[in-house]
Image (tube, rainbow, N blue to C red):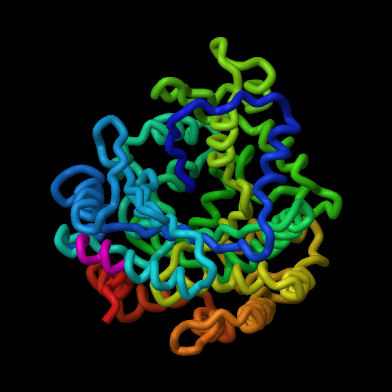
Amino acid sequence: MSQFIPQAGVSPEIAGRAQLIEAFVGAAKPRAEWRIGTEYEKVAVRRSDGQAAPFSGPRGIETLLTRLADRYGWEPIEDDGRVIALAGGKASITLEPGGQVELSGELCDSVHCAAAEFAQHIDQVVTVGDELDLAFLGLGMQPMTRVPDFELVPKKRYGIMWPYMARVGTLGQRMMTQTATVQMNLDYADEPDAMRKLRLGMGLDPLLTAMFANSPLSDGDLNGYASLRAHIWSDTDRARCGLLPFAFNPSAGFEDYVDWALDVPMYFIVRDGAWIDMTAHTFRAFLQHGYAGGRATMADWNAHLTTLFPQVRLKGYIELRSADSQAPELMLAAPALAKGLFYTDDCVLAAWDLVKAWSWEDRLALWRDVPRQALQARVGRRRLAELAPELVAIAAEGLRRQAQRNRAGDDESIYLERLAALVKRGRCPADEVIEHWLGDWQGDVQRLIAGSSYRIAA
């Protein structure tokens, strides 16, 4: 879940809808300036019992942030005197509502850059986490803690979202507290390129969800899903989540996304440091009528964009939101797959060829079936397991053509090798977790922690 931190200064008022469209046009970048950004969420648990790490207290997430700031030079960000995030020169560390720790990484020109940054981040959080008896698990869900038992991170944004989620769906509070994802952010050259990537991301969503399904454990046991995280989004808030039908229209443009976003209910605005609940208003109504004598600003619009949760999101870049958080050996596969597919023209076309024939009804059926069945879900007579190796091969070819090498001379396709081996066997990460849980872990939380914790690289 992307974060919003109020910015100092005066934001310009919005003159009209055209200004919102133009903001997306102005965010385009020439190909030479394209980068990839990755957001890595991780669930934190107490080593003693596998329950979610509390926010407060001497062994809580706030203490983790404080020590990271003291030791590694991060700048603390406070909300009512509580440390709720850290800022760095090129990256930030933020918290999801249930204390999930997220690295919003720097904008990298290669996955090699992202890998080095991620390794350093893991070294830091695991070092401090060990001192606090906290572990970070390579899973897409909190495996043990039930929703009522979480300490909600004390951010004003979450105080508005929490009761609203209970009104608009049955699973939104689970999304806020229990889930963890890895998200990829991609640049675009112009409006046609942005819409082509939005369409491809929406089209590939079932495959990406299935390949990275990694949340079969929750509330202390197997939950019957390969990706419960993906299922949770199906009844979080249908006004702002899911697949966007207009994305599959070849003539779709920025104005279609703007019109959709204008009609989604808001969460909040910030005025003079006060967070104002705006959940009774769409942004369109706010833009037309204002609120309490004030008019809508571009800062309000940018904040609103962070509260929209479709499977692929537009925010001046393309954000892919389909994947569960991963074990460390697969975490870099997500940005590598995205970069290989979306930053090589032939690969964009080849990837779209895999999914372009699906009807809207096919896509909705997969949206329903993939969370339980993962790669075993079918479109007609074909299982997604048959398509996944092809998709990984297309991405690997894209990365080989991009030819960005590390010091050892390896191109970025090395980050896809484990994923390629997994999907070649028709398996996703959840299959491995389930096998361990029923086998050598024997349903024991300590074995789960030992088998799925992040570790400092040797």
- Taken as a whole, is the magenta stretch helix, strand or loop? helix
Q: Is residue 389 visible?
A: no
Q: Is residue 57 left or right of residue 200?
A: left
Q: Quadrant of residue 440?
A: bottom left
Residue at image x 35%, y 60%? 143
Res. 342 visible in picture: yes
Camera-side residue of 12 and 184 = 12
x then y, percent, for residue 85: 33, 45
417 with respect to 262 (left or right): left
Q: Residue at x 41, y 77 (%)?
A: 329
Q: Find out whether residue 208 is within the magenta segment.
A: no
Q: Position of residue 321 (x, y in %)?
A: 56, 56
Residue situated in front as seen by the camera: 66 or 207: 66
**Residue toward you, 50 or 221:** 50
Residue 154 pos. (x, y %): 31, 36
Q: Is residue 370 above or below residue 447?
A: above
Residue visible at 66% across and 71% down in the picture: 341
Asked if residue 182 is positioned above or below residue 315 in the image, the reply reads below
Which quadrant of the structure image shows residue 391? bottom right
Q: Which residues are magenta?
A: 122-129
